[in-house]
Image (tube, rainbow, N blue to C red):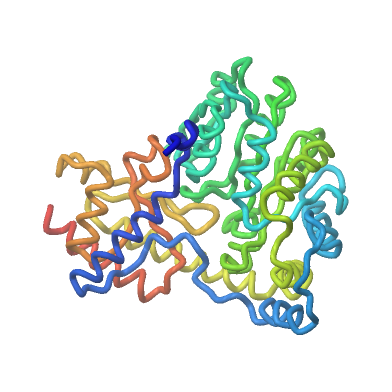
Amino acid sequence: MKPFSKRMPHLGTENAFSVITKAKQFEKESGVKLVYLQIGEPGFDTPKNINDAAKAAIDDNQTHYTPTAGIPALREAIAAYHTKYSAEPYEASDTVVVPGGKPVMFYMINALIDEGDEVIVPNPCYPIYESVTEYLGGKVVPIALKEENEFNFSADELEKLITPKTKLIILNSPQNPTGAVYTRELLWDIAELAKKHDLWILSDEIYDQMVHDGEHISITSIEGMPERTVVLNGCSKTYAMTGYRVGWAVTKNAQMASYIEQFACNDVSCVNVPAQYAALEALTGPQKAVKDMLKAYKKRRDLMVGLINQISGMRCHAPKGAFYLMVNVRQILDKLDIDAAELCDRIMREAHVLVLPGTVFGKFGDDFIRLSYVSTEEQIKDGLSKIKKYIDKIY
């Protein structure tokens, strides 16, 4: 048979899903039920009014093709939503609706990156940023997110990585996996560097409504940035709609918007239509459920942080956003002479709790494990009690 594409070995994946597969196999073979503290999706059901909107769309036979970029009402709602965070207003034509957040990454990076072009990516990070860049022949240039700096980086560190081949900087705030939130000052400095070196920005703001301390700030709030930025957002996290698969790209650069729409047309034609009507209801309907979920996440965050810092060899700070914790376990790793992946495997097999190694999110995650506080308070208490008992045996 003819060989596969030479690009395929460069395409990565989300190793978090591989960990879940291994966990399910362990449960099947051992008969043990694990406590899942690694999950990266909301711990709530989709609000009823949103599901009702999807059902109503089906009953109204809204089940046919739409324009590739989305139904007009949803695009208008998306533009209005992002105008709140922008230095200049968005129009419906500045938006493209796609099936989830990942297509925004894939389409934008495809539109920009040629072989050898450099993309600066915060690390540890959501792995698909690096995967798509490397698949297309681009070079990933990681910038370390440092625990002592609340998992942020400095403008000086960023500028040192910029070369004539740099084309794109990827931002994610609030961030997966660290929960970090960029300050207004840092965003201003990044914007100045982007203008100075004529760079694009991909701003992943999928957790924008999950800021526990302070408020969400978009780099598009800085003059001159909406034209060189693509904002990635969607319904998955804020509205607990992961399975609906509705995301979008927003940019004031008409050529980029056109290219993203062109990719979407070639790839998916359009987004599931009842899901689009559900997304419209999510954006324009009552927001009480969003506030209630955020309140619950903050309470669970504080509970988890307190319990983790009682475990020997583990430490973490309270993240300002999203629903993730990066826990420093370097002391335990050195004591056992193992890496984070092995520690997580032992915690699964011996403590019966599933967590993720920080290296799933990049090379600068090697001192950490990642937990998520979307689980119930009872599950958090149970899981961390089991981890503590296991770690106490080591000490």
Residue 23 on image: x %, y %: 29, 62
Residue at 63% from the left image edge and 15% from the top image edge: 164
Residue 145 on image: x %, y %: 47, 36
94, 262: nearer the viewer: 262
Residue at 35% from the left image edge and 53% from the top image edge: 356
146, 74: nearer the viewer: 74
Extreme residue in the front direction: 1
The answer to whether residue 96 is above or below residue 118 is below
Residue 277 on image: x %, y %: 76, 71
The quadrant of the picture occupied by the N terminus is top left
The answer to whether residue 234 is above or below residue 126 is below
214, 211: nearer the viewer: 211
Extreme residue in the top direction: 164
Residue 344 on image: x %, y %: 26, 53
Residue at 60% from the left image edge and 23% from the top image edge: 117
Query: Could you tell whether 235 is left or right of 146 in the image?
Result: right
4, 260: nearer the viewer: 4
The answer to whether residue 233 is above or below residue 364 is below
Query: Could you tell whether 205 is left or right of 85 in the image?
Result: left
Q: Quadrant of residue 79?
A: bottom right
Query: Could you tell whether 191 is left or right of 36 in the image?
Result: right
Query: Could you tell whether 206 is left or right of 326 in the image?
Result: right
Instruction: Report the number of discs.
Output: 0
Residue at 45% from the left image edge and 41% from the top image edge: 12
